[in-house]
Image: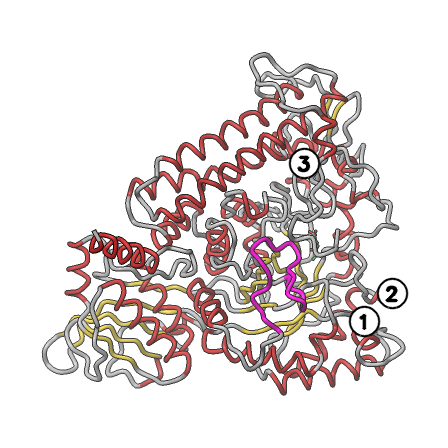
Amino acid sequence: MRKIVSLFILLMTASRLFAEDGYRLWLRYDKIDNSILLQQYRNNISSVVINGSSPTIIAARQELLAGLDGLLAKKVPEAKEIKNNSIVIFKKTSGFPETIGVDYTALGEEGFAISTLKLSSKGNAEDIIAISANTDMGVLYGVFYFLRLLQTHQSIQHLSVISVPKIQLRILDHWDNLNRSVERGYAGISIWNWHTLPDYIDQRYIDYARANASIGINGSVLTNVNANALVLTKTFLEKVAALANVFRPYGIKVYLTARFSAPVEIGGLKTADPLNAEVQQWWKKKVDTIYQYIPDFGGFLVKANSEGQPGPQNYQRTHADGANMLADAVAPYGGIVMWRAFVYSNETPTDRFKQAYDEFKPLDGQFRKNVLIQVKNGPIDFQPREPFHPLFGSMPQTPLMMEFQITQEYLGQATHLVYEAPLFKECIDADTYAKGKGSTVAKIIDGSLDNHSISGIAGVANIGNERNWTGHPFGQANWYAFGRLAWDHDLASAQIADEWIKQTFTNNKTFVDGVKEIMLASRQIMVNYMTPLGLHHIMGTGNHYGPAPWVNNVGRADWNPVYYHRADSIGIGFDRTSSGSNALSQYTSTVSGPWSNLKTCPDEYLLWFHHVPWNYTMRSGRTLWGELCYQYYSGVDSAKWMQQTWNKMEGWTDEERFRQVKMLLTIQEKEAVWWRNACLLYFQTFSKMPLPDGYEKPGHTLEYYKGLRFPFAPGNGGNL
Ligand code: GCW
């Protein structure tokens, strides 16, 4: 009996040791569970030959050896001599014995080649796999790519891979405060422990860098755009430098947010006017100091004159004056300024949709060469579905950066499974027609449409100190998808999901197929149960949690949901045609033409652009009210389908994450019902039409939903 008990305890401990807590993300490197494939890989990989000794090559070496060790479950020896079945990693200039037929000019600074070769330098032809690049970073990216091939069970025979990033700056924006709270963060507190930095280097910093490098992210803005000037003081710069040192071998540059009023707040000046010589001097000296600490500092991200942040307009100067002043300060060091276009003013009575365009378009051509304007994917604010921002295609002389939000502020936060790649793709693939057909948002942000020499894309991070980094296990997929699309915006959502599932969970086909189906459908499902037919910004005030389309008492008009849906006894939706706010005029006529006409406007954008009568006949033949009900109800049905499909996955993956996701899907389904009921009961007070027959009745009254309060919902950080 005692023996049995101790065996049981032993087994429990063992399973504990191997419990999947999600920390390893998509870099798990567990033994390949397909014995035939495992044997093939083992046969094809007999040794590793590494040329070079830079910190980046050392990182590549460690990753490759650890990866092979785990995946092949055997120690692959490191060798000096190239033999049959060696994997050779090297930089072009490192004196590799012979040319291997790769066009290195095409690889640039970060691209890589992976080639299966017959090497004949010593008489006998040897089969090898060469991972090569112009730079050490290219080599590291190549190593991660190679490991992904094994993790996703692909053939490693006859390899001839060339991979080059399409966008130069691929950045995560952390909205992390110095007190470690994270604005719109749903995965714990900030991973930056400012208190123990610079001397204590958390293993998480290294694993963060590895994870980012594995998907090609090459920049990190450490601090919130609602900025604190203190991060620019020496005490903090020393800490920032410690992080930069960890990230450097992984090709990740550090950026900071610059609080525009810093010269006043920490510099003791009376003004922060960008045209004031003393202010300019202050920033120059500040930048000199920053570069003493961090020689490869990337530059600044700035939110100015938006939601209460200070900016050049406080001194009657323009966004260009402000951005250029900072750009001049960082230019000698090769730094850049990312200036956000997310501006809208309480004083301006025009439709919030139009304000960024109105303010920034006239400034096209006035920014320094090292300024990028960072534009959100939609004109309002990262809603479940937005039309693309009209600034894309409207500022040909200025490099525009994309700002996506990975953290799910408006997408169910950390309890809803929503795979964002389809959302990102929808925006990236949108055609602006700025220079005729094919002028996609992708070509604007990668700089190719207007021939810009810099290009960038940013994602607001969903990372916190929770063990699995992102709270919801599927939040990891959004971090992953952002990185992969930033590297190659032509990738398909399905492919990204496929490789993420295989690396993060298993290659088992039943699991991969089932989970992929859930992921690919999830975004549209969420749109249906939250904001169908182009509804937007109807969530709770402050924490942005849950439905609250009735809110009409927040300080400024455009923070109120009623401002956006405009429901009345006639209909619902925001008229942005020429008879309304005319925001549609900000798009090229090829785009705005179909959207302006109620008959040709796609259903998914309908209430973005039109105030539509409740009894209007939709394409489906239903009335608008009927269609709204239909979409909300089908959203809930599909949320149930997600649960059922996930339940079938039991046994195909580890118990721990299976159960976690199962519980979260239950919350998601409950919240989908909540969204549906609260919104329909409220809109019904205007439509005065009944729920169609056969639909289950809401479980509570409208008053009940209106009375719900969530004083401690996460992510609010005291801001609206
Ligand atoms: O989406 C809104 C958020 C704010 C955020 C702001 C912005 C950082 O609710 O929390 O502030 O956008 O992007 O600046």
Disc 2 target residue:
314
Task: Examine the image and state in which quarter residue 458 appears.
Answer: bottom right
Numbered disc in front, either 2 or 1: 1
* Magenta span contains residue 179: yes
Numbered disc in front, either 3 or 1: 3
Instruction: Tell me what residue is drawn at x 39 percent, y 64 percent.
Output: 163
- 404 to 612, vertically: above or below: below
Instruction: Tell me what residue is drawn at x 31 percent, y 50 percent.
Output: 506
Disc 3 target residue:
547
- What residue range appears in magenta? 175-194
Residue 414 image position (x, y, % from top left): 56, 48
User: Quarter of the picture for ligand 1?
Assistant: bottom right
Task: Examine the image and state in which quarter residue 617 appears.
Answer: top right
Q: CA distance from mark 3 to mark 1?
A: 36 Å
| Contact between labelled residues 1 and 2, with CB atoms less than 8 Å apart | yes
- Which badge, 2 or 1, is on the more N-terminal residue? 1
Q: Is residue 110 visible?
A: yes
Residue nearest the viewer, comparing 672 with 78: 672
Query: What amino acid is at disc 3?
Result: Pro
Q: Which mark is residue 261?
A: 1
Q: Is residue 453 visible?
A: no
Label 2 residue SS: helix
Q: How is the image coloured?
A: secondary structure
Q: Find the residue positioned furthest to the left.
A: 124
Residue 714 image position (x, y, % from top left): 64, 51
Residue nearest the viewer, comparing 261 with 347: 261
Q: Main secondary structure of the magenta part?
A: loop
Query: What amino acid is at disc 1?
Result: Ser
- 204 to 182, vertically: above or below: below
